[in-house]
Amino acid sequence: MAVDEAEAAEFADPPRKWGRVGAMAGAWAIVVALGGWVAPSFAESGNPANVDPRDEAASSANNAAWRYLRYGSNQDLERAEATLCEGASPELTPSDLDAIRQAYDAELGGITRVDLETGDPVPGVDGTTVAGTVSYIHEATQRFEEFVITVQEDDGAFCVSNAVRVGGEEPGSGDDLGEVVDPEAVAADFMRAIVVEREPGSAAAPHCAANTGVTPEEIDAAISEWAKANGEFTAFIDTIEPAESSETSITAFTFEISLKASLNQETFSFTVAVQEGCVTMISGGDGLI
């Protein structure tokens, strides 16, 4: 077949630079020859960007304690287990931490957030101890648990050797001590029924037979009056703080509650006193009642 010289010239291969081709071929041969050790070196070096920070080794005693409580309380039990020292058998296991979370999940009707605070490390004979407080939060309601974590250090590496729930029931005691009532939980449930759920009748259940001060119905009526002046609103509990009490048998708490409408938000303070598992007095509410 005849070849069109003009067409052949138009689509001809570019001119070869044979010196450059030879140099490239030689370089490629060296790469292939060295590939046996070049490739593994890349694999071994890894890419730091691909390392999940949660899987890095603990950098301090405080960090090891934080990881154990955080992951155990946040449904990440494998990472909590990884924080333990080899062969460690803590009194409070990651599964125990998860069980505590589940109990509060059932009590509060869900958990929207888990917060954690740790204190300063304290060196000791058996290792470094770190105190931690875990907060289980559902909307405006929260519960607290306190723990003590023991951490060991070996040549700059930190791991958890033991964990204890402060104030928790001693395992295997065999004594029937009855149900332990948490005064803060009693007060919080009481105020939540009035302020958040707007069911003052159910709040009357933990009322002591003889009680003084403001009644649940009076608080509910005052909130209704506030709503008439401000329109549609939401109510929630901002903070719960221990309060002073003149009697040792009474435990008191100060509640800051907020009422929030589209154009106005106000905060009011109440003090709730608890005695023997029931609310014995409510006071405060200045500006609302």
Image: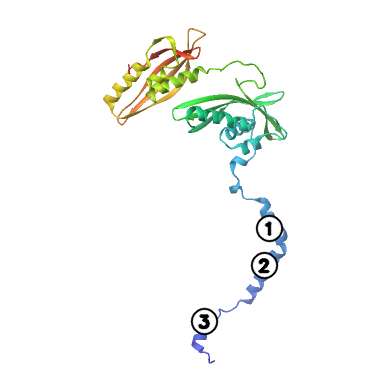
What is the spatial separation of the Cα atoms under label 1 and label 3, in whole angstroms? 40 Å
The residue to which callout 3 is attached is 11
- Identified at 62% across, 35% down, the residue is 80
User: Disc 3 residue type?
Assistant: Phe
Of 11 and 113, the residue lying toward us: 113
Nearer to us in this view, 189 or 289: 189
Give x and y (percent) for residue 78.
63, 39
Q: Amino acid at mark 2?
A: Trp
Q: Measuring 64% from the left and 30% from the top, which residue is drawn there? A: 93
What crowding class fits label 3: few (fewer than 14 Cα within 10 Å), some (14-19), or many (20 or more)? few
Q: Position of residue 172 (x, y in %)?
A: 67, 21
Q: Where, quadrant-wise, is the N terminus in this rendering?
A: bottom right
Q: Which residue is mark 2?
A: 28
Q: Quadrant of residue 87?
A: top right
Residue, disc 1: 39
Q: Residue at x 46, y 26 (%)?
A: 141
**Regarding mark 1 in the picture, which secondary structure is present there?**
helix
* Furthest-left residue in this view: 229
Secondary structure state at the residue bearing disc 3: loop
Query: Which is more N-terminal, label 3 or label 1?
Result: 3
**Whole-percent x and y of residue 274?**
47, 13
Question: Which one is closest to the eye, mark 2 or mark 1?
Answer: 1
Indicate the quadrant where residue 170 lies. top right
Name the residue rendered at 50%, 14% in the picture.
277
Left or right placement of residue 228 versus residue 177 in this view: left
